[in-house]
Amino acid sequence: MATEEVLVDEITYPTKITTTKPLSLLGHGITDMEIHFIHVKFYSIGVYLEPEVVGHLDQFKGKSAKELEDNEEFFNALISAPMEKFIRLVVIKEIKGAQYGVQIETAVRDRLAAEDKYEEEEEEALEKVIEFFQSKYFKKLSVITYHFPANSATAEIVVSLEGKEDSKYVIENANVVEANKKWYLGGSSAVSSSTIQSLASTFSQSCPSE
């Protein structure tokens, strides 16, 4: 049976994938920016979650997509739900791995510093993540995935570049892992507002009022 697909800015995302268990595409969007009045798109994002995650968000039943979008507690509950999460990025605009690494470094460090969790261990763990991306070059349609297993404080990053074997790296520092989740799933502070809007819309439809 063919897997259904969704187009995210002309990039194909399957609606279902299987990691250790089946996951569904529950949110998607892009990262973009206006540069000198030109709309530049950087990469598309697909967020895959266990469909059962809806049951962990019962307290938000009956809220509209807009209410969820503005509700930080909703996204905190989504991030902390003890279920598998998988985020797939597909590059739209070519970027050097070093540039992408700087984006991660800034986003993660600022989040952890604000929460007073940026210690020597976090700095070292973050440096290793930056080092992993340093020598890579992301052409259009290169893929970066983040896999957050259920009930685990680790995250596996996989980079797929055309004509090369996939490269993998596992983040083992719980605070750095959490900050990466928040970068993509953290409500108003997340990197992609369109992805946050999409997640809010999906859950408002999945959790209607009784």
Image (spheres, rainbow, N blue to C red):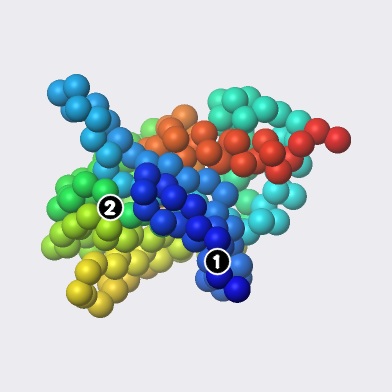
State which quadrant residue 22 falls in.
Answer: bottom right
Identity of the residue drawn at 59% across and 25% down: 66
The quadrant of the image that shows the N terminus is bottom right
Q: Position of residue 35 (x, y in %)?
A: 18, 27
Question: Please, what is the three-letter code of the amino acid marked with disc 2?
Answer: Val
Residue carrying label 1? 3
Residue 91: give its label: 2
Q: Is residue 94 left or right of residue 149?
A: left
Q: Is residue 84 visible?
A: no
For image coordinates 20% across by 57% down, the residue present is 138
Q: Seen in the image, is 61 located left or right of residue 95?
A: right
The image quarter containing residue 110 is: top left
Q: Position of residue 165 (x, y in %)?
A: 25, 77
Q: Nearer the viewer, mark 2 or mark 1?
A: 1
Q: Is residue 62 visible?
A: yes
Furthest toward the top, the residue is 37
Residue 67 lies, with reference to residue 90, above or below; the image says: above
Q: Residues within 10 Å of mark 1 (few under 14, many from 20)?
A: few
Q: Residue furthest right?
A: 210
Q: Residue furthest bottom?
A: 165
Q: Quadrant of the C terminus?
A: top right
Residue in the picture at 70% in, 56% down? 52
- Classify mark 2: helix, strand or loop: strand
Q: Secondary structure at mark 1?
A: loop
